[in-house]
Amino acid sequence: MTRGTSPAHPALMRIPVTQMSNEVLLRQLLDAIPSYVFLMDKDVSILDYNAAAGDFLGLGRRRILRHRAGEVFHCLHSRDVTAGCGYGPVCQGCLVRGAVNEAFTGKKCVRRQVSMELCSGRDVKRLHALLTAAPFAYQGHERAVLIIEDLGEFAACQPLLQLASGLTDLKTVPTAPRLRA
């Protein structure tokens, strides 16, 4: 041991990434993220997702993978036309599809605050969320990651934040676009 160094504590030692398989590392990383994370293609079909997204959707992998977002999120308009999600007249204004498409075409990260209503049968889940879509390439294929962050807990804490900080002009965005998916 040289002067000025201390022995490495076993709990503080890092496991080199090269000792983990890339698949295991990626799966553990994705599943550790509490937001809903989706890997998308240009058709806005879901290629993979993390554990939080799976829990939120409550569907099996067969009903999620390779299906378009509108079908998985139970969009009211996903069956307007026989071609399905993304091809109906209302689909041009879809917040999810719009964010993913903009990420692909602009080759940049897109972030939007939205209000979503996710319908399943008679149940409606209301979600105030931050949508983030960012493009990337992998093995010659263009992909996008879509992250949906539930801002509901933040919105519930907002009055406390205002009171504690003395800010009176901190407000939610009541006119945020709504997605009826």
Image (cartoon, rainbow, N blue to C red):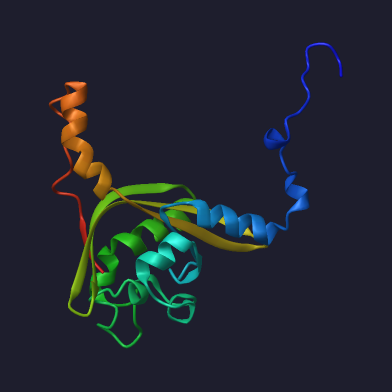
Residue 158: x percent and y percent? 20, 37
Instruction: Give the answer, above or below, for where 35 lies relative to 9.
Output: below
Residue, far top: 3
How many numbered callouts? Answer: 0
Q: Residue at x 14, y 49 (%)?
A: 175
Residue, far bottom: 82
Q: Residue at x 43, y 60 (%)?
A: 52
Q: Quadrant of the N terminus?
A: top right
Foreground pick, 116 / 28 = 28
Q: Quadrant of the C terminus?
A: bottom left
Foreground pick, 3 / 127 = 3
Residue 32: x percent and y percent? 51, 52
143 on left or right of 94: right
Foreground pick, 135 / 33 = 33
104 on left or right of 139: left
Residue 139: x percent and y percent? 67, 62
To which quarter of the image does residue 146 belong?
A: bottom left
Residue, far right: 1
Residue 109: x percent and y percent? 44, 47
Instruction: Give the answer, above or below, for where 6 lies relative to 123.
Output: above
Q: Residue at x 57, y 52 (%)?
A: 29
174 on left or right of 76: left
To which quarter of the image does residue 86 belong?
A: bottom left
